[in-house]
Structures are given as structure tokens and as C-alpha cells.
Amino acid sequence: MPLTAGTPLGSFEIVSPLGAGGMGEVYRARHLKLGRDVAIKVLPSDLASDPQRRHRFEREARAASALNHPNIVTIHDIDEHDGIHYIAMELVEGRTLRELLAGAPLPVGRLLALAPQIAEGLAKAHAAGIVHRDLKPENLMVTDDGLVKILDFGLAKLAPPSAKVGSDVTTVEQATRAGVVLGTVPYMSPEQAASRPVDFRSDQFSFGSILYEMATGRRAFRKDTTPQTLAAIIEGEPEPVGRLNRRLPAPLIAIIERCLAKDPEKRFASTRDLAAALQTVPERPAASPIRRRVFWTVAGLVAIGLAWALLPNASRLWRSLTPGASAPAIQAVAVLPLQNLSGDPEQEYFADGMTEALITDLARIGALKVISHSSAMRYKGTKAPLADIARELGVDALIEGSALRVGDRVRITAQLVDPRTQQALWADSYERAMEDVLRLQSQVAQAVAREIRITVTPEEQRQLASTRAVKPAVHEAYLKGMFYLNKLTPEGFERGLAHLNQAVAADAEDPLAHAGLALLYSQIGSHVPAPPPDAFSKARAAALRALELDDTLAEAHAALAQIQLYHDWDWPSAERSFKRALELNPNSAPAHAHYAWYLNLFGHQTEALAEMRKAQAVDPLTAIWTCWLGDLRWSEGRYDEALEHIGRALELDPDLPWAHYMSGLVHAAKGEYKEALAAHEKAVAGLPSLRASFGYYYALMGRRKEAREIAAEIAGAPGHGDALDLAKIHLALGEEDEAFRWLDVAYEKRLPFTPWTRNLPPFAPLRADPRFRELLQRMKLPV
């Protein structure tokens, strides 16, 4: 079982968990005598009883402890305490290479600072006769000062000093189960993937795969399935690395291609040679002498003629004149909450509104991942290091700045920051009259897009350039309405509604105000207990009016899609509206998430999961999307995976009622009723309207009297908002006729989630009943 803080372990005391892998759990611990923090790797108790596994664990320590090198983690001790086998090693503070990559290529300068260190560490191991065999970005730690440490020699196999090259194998019955290939598939060498003998050159191939990913942001060999990936490693060729990144120096391209040679004989004769070759790679691609003379002549003339005029933007000029310079590859950004410079707390809505508007404009660019407003706002008022924020959000760059409104004038300052170097890549200030605030927002977004050199399609360019004048009082009311809507609380809905109605009353021709009302009413209608009966009709009227005024508003299309999905049950129209919303704003987390539920309803589970993960990617700190990933897995019957996602959602938001609610449903599906009740108690503490599901759990547990009491209580309440819960209770009691009676009520009242009875686990016993098939037909769903 996991060790807790304070647990003694020989000369050490456990401080906190750090992680876990196939060969052990890792903890931060403190040496009691020296007061030094170390990392402790503990062999799980279920493996400690296996002599072969224990031997392999100890072999890892012996292999790594023999390698005294700055780029290899240092082993301090190996011991056993009260039956617990562990290794004490150097505690490396920093980020893994996987975290640094975050799906994007590294700048060439950064790559050339890290890669030689990895090669030097490998060269040391190979000279000692040790092959790592599981080299991957997760096993490479980079400290804050740029030092690389190779971790986890758990799959290394000591070769006798006199062993012939090629004597090591990847399928070793003494090391693991017979026929199991050791390693991580995307980074295996062809000989490793084919279970052929391997030597140090296998690590060179794995290193080449890592270099390829560092240079391009893409894996060299990545297919849909593991067998396809293995086949590609053995027989296929990756897309030429130089085609994917034209800033790479030719010597670096040659090194990557040589490491990735299928024939080990064509790789480097020694890893020391590989490390030496990396040390000689220039940071910039070479230019011809004539080209260099022409370039510097032109650059000099331009610099002399324009230096004074362009001095404030000298860094931008330098980068534009030096196309070979190493600039960060920016494919994902986050706009941090703009600072309110007014000093007036009542003006917070304006700074927050400008933040959201800038996010919305940038989110129109399909080639750019833009973190959503809800995740970005988590950092309001915090002093967290920019590098930590970028890592948590999975972005390459951050936009920070300020907003100020004085009278009828608006000023926004913004700067684009590389979080790794803390350097501003670009900065500027904009000021306009309040009536031109939309043009100001668009101007900032276009400047950012130009600076990061992201591809903007002609349609996206038209959207960014298409602005209109606003009435200051109307736009102010709209900003206040959205400020309160984004709080997602009953009080926030009430105050947001007042401000948005005020905006519409002041200017019935403002499409943003109508779109805001549509989003608010659709949110109330689909996700608020006992919503007003006219919520969806008001949402529809507002959405249609917004689209009549401006049919390029993604928010209006998204609101209409939710109405068509959860209330109208107009499936073709819902799909069209979702697709149009995502076409206009590819970075809309709510649109991706709700479209996922549409796909789930029709059994397109792979696509549904992909859409929910997109929502999670652009809004990583909002727990509900991670919770809904668990919900989707629950609908498939994959209960353990569902609990993993729900657990991560609760790490983000320990008080999220829906996560506790889903945890209860999943535990109940597994027959773990004690855990289900405990989870549901937490759900009800945050959202009392969820109490009805206690009746369902009691029915499953055979506590029929208590189940009937809750059923009678909620059946007597007005509105029949809990008709689906009543159907679940009676179905669990074995009373199918009564369950169908309440399903008919849910259908007649058009309760938003009635269609999903088609594939949710509690209703599985009804699927063979003709009455259930008839219900699905009434909702125009596949039977």
C-alpha cells in the first residue's frame, strides 16, 4: 500500500509521493541524519515477493550507481526495511522533457543545449556496458538551470565487459514474462520492436526518435494502434525532419537521420562519436557567402535608415531580418487576466471582459491553441512563476498586460512572453475611444498572430478584421453580464441576466448582447435544477436574433446547438450548429464538450472522447470537462478508467458536486455501495437537488423501504424535475411498469437528458423491452 508522510524507511523519512511507474512508486524523503531530501523508489509489495522482479529492481540500482556522471541520476543507497525494498537516489527538481515539449518543437538553441547532455550521459553508460532500453522524454529530467538527468535504468541489462556487441536481447525470460518486449513502443528501435538482439545502438535509435520530436513537436513513428506503430518502426520511414522544420541546421538533420537508420551498422560506431557530433552543430543553418554578403548589406542599409524610427521595436526588427534566428515555436498561448489599472474594484468587470474578448478573438485562429477564459482566470491575482503557469496550461507563450478605461477612452497594453526565458518577445500599447473597443481587441489579436507567425486563413482574417462600433453603455452592460454569467452560480445568473437585459433594452441591434442572453438561458435550461419553463424558448429567440444580426458569432451558434440538442431533440440541426460554432471558434471548450455528448448519444464514442479531450486541452483547469471524460467512460462500462478521470477532476476542484455525483454512480455500477453512498453525500452537500439518487442506491442495496420513501418524497414535489431519478429507482426495485411511467413523464416534459437513457448503464435492463425501443423511436433515435 502507498507510504504516507512520516513513515520511517531505514535512514530516511517519507515526505510526500512523487509518482509511480511499472517498477515502483517514487517518494520524496528526507535523510534523518543529514537533513537532505532524496527520491526514494520503492518496489511494490506484490512484486517484492517475486525473486526475478526483485533482482531486476536491485540490478537497476547497481547499474545506475556505477555511472558517476552529471547527466545521470546519482544513486545514494539500496536497502530493505521491514520487507520494503527501496533505492535512495538524487532528488532532481525540474520538468521532464515531455513537459518541456508539450506537443511543440523546441527552439534550435534549446535543443542544442539539451541534446549533447543526453548523448554524454548515454555515452558514459554505454562505455560501462549498460544499455538503457527505455529511453523516452518521460525519463529525461531538465532542471531549472538547464541540466539534463537521465532517469530510470529499470530496463537496463548489464552486459559482461567481454560480451560481444549484439549479445543483449529485448525479450528475456529471466527479466520479465516470456515473449514480452521491454521498452516503450514509440521510442523502440527496430531490433527491439522485432525482439531481436540489441546493444548500445538501440539507445541511439531511441535517442534519434527523441531528437526528432524535439525538432518537430511530433513523434517519428505514431500510428493508431500499437501493432501499426511497431510495424512503422520496423519497416516505415518518418516524414523528413527537415521538411517539418526548415530552421534546422543541416548537420543536426544528418545526425537525426543517422540515429534513425534501420540498420544498426549505419548508426554511430560509438555514442561518444554521437555526442561529439552534436557539439559541433551550429545553432543557425548556414548561408552561402554571396547570400550572406547581400543579406548583411541590405540589413545594414535598412538598420541605418530606419534605426531611430524603429528603435522601440528593435527586437522585432532583428528577428524579421534574421530568418535563421532561433525563435520559440509558438502553437499554444494563454492570455493571463489583464490587470485592472483603475484601482477601482468596481472596474474589475472591464479588465476581465477585455481578457475574455482577446481570448475570443485569438480563439478564432484554428492553427493556434488558445486556453479558455475559465482556466486563464484561475491565475488572477496570483504570483506563480510564468514557467509554472505555462507548464500547467500546456502552452508555449503567455500574453499578459493591463486594461484601463478613463471616460470614453480605452487603453490596453499587452506583451507576449516566452515563459522559459522570461523575455518579452513583443510588446505594444493601444488606445481608442470606447465605441471602437471591438476594433482595438481585434488589433491586439492580429498583432499577436503576426508576431508568432501562425497561419491565419482568409476566413479567419476576415473575422478578425470585421469589427463594428458599439455604444459604450451597451457594451459596458454586456461586459458586466458576461462577468456574472462566468461565475456559474445562481446569484451570478440572476445578476448577469439583469445586465444583459439592460444591454438589449438599450440597443436591440447589438448581436453580442443577444448572444450573451442565449448562452445564459441555455445554461439555465440544461444545467440548473428546476429551470423556468420558458428558459429554452427565450434562449432560442435570443440566439436567432443574434445570428440575424451577425451570423459569424460562434457563441450564438453554440447556444443554438445546445437548445437543439437538449430541448428540441433536433439531431441534424444540432450537429450542423455545433460544427459551425467550432468552425468559427475551434478553441471553444463548451462547444467541444457538448458536441461530445451529441456524438456519445449516437454511439460515436471514439469521436466523443476526442472532442471532450479537446475541451480539456483548451480549458485544462476547469474540472467539469475531466469529470465528463469519466462520465463518457462510465457510459461505456469502463468503470476503472471513469474513476481515474473523476479523481483527476476532484484534484482540480475537490468540491465539484457533479464529480462526487459521478463517482457515486460509477461505484454503484461496480457494486461498491458503501463508496457510492459516501461519494453521494459529498455531492448533495454541494448541490442538495441531487438527493434523489440516494433512492436509487438504496434500491440497488435492497433497502427497499428507504428507496420507496425517497421516491414518494420526490414524486410529490412540483414539476417532476426528477422523473429520470424516479425511473431509475423503480427500475432498480424491479418495477419496470412504474419506471416506464416516469420515463414517459420525462419525455413529455422534455427533460434535457432523457435521450441519453439510450446508452447509460442504469437503464441497460430496459433495452430489450419493446416499450423502450418505442420511446427511442419517438425521440428519433436509433433503436
Image (cartoon, rainbow, N blue to C red):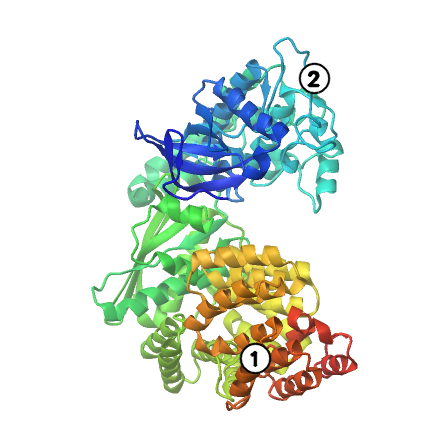
Which element type, helix, strand or loop, lies under badge 2? loop
- Please name the amino acid that badge 2 sits on: Gly
In front of the other: 277 or 244: 277
Q: Position of residue 88 (x, y in %)?
A: 43, 28
Q: Residue 628: which disc?
A: none
In front of the other: 262 or 322: 262
Callout 2 crowding tier (Cα within 10 Å): few <14, some 14–19, many ≥20: some
From what the image shows, is residue 707 above or below residue 640? below
Classify residue 354 as left or right of residue 184. left
Label located before the other in sequence (2 or 1): 2
From what the image shows, is residue 178 above or below residue 782? above
Which element type, helix, strand or loop, lies under badge 1? helix
From what the image shows, is residue 538 above or below residue 446? below
Look at the numbered discs 2 and 1 and tell me whether their residues touch, using CB distance below 8 Å: no
From what the image shows, is residue 236 above or below residue 537? above
Residue 217 visible: yes
Read off the residue under disc 1: 707
- Please name the amino acid that badge 1 sits on: Ala
Classify residue 782 as left or right of residue 562. right
Q: Residue 166: which disc?
A: 2
Please identify the residue farthest to the top as the structure is shown.
162
Q: Nearer the viewer, mark 2 or mark 1?
A: 1
Q: CA distance from mark 2 to mark 1?
A: 68 Å
Residue 442 visible: no
Residue that appears at 36% across and 74% down: 484
Q: Quadrant of residue 301?
A: top left
Residue that appears at 40% across and 60% down: 443
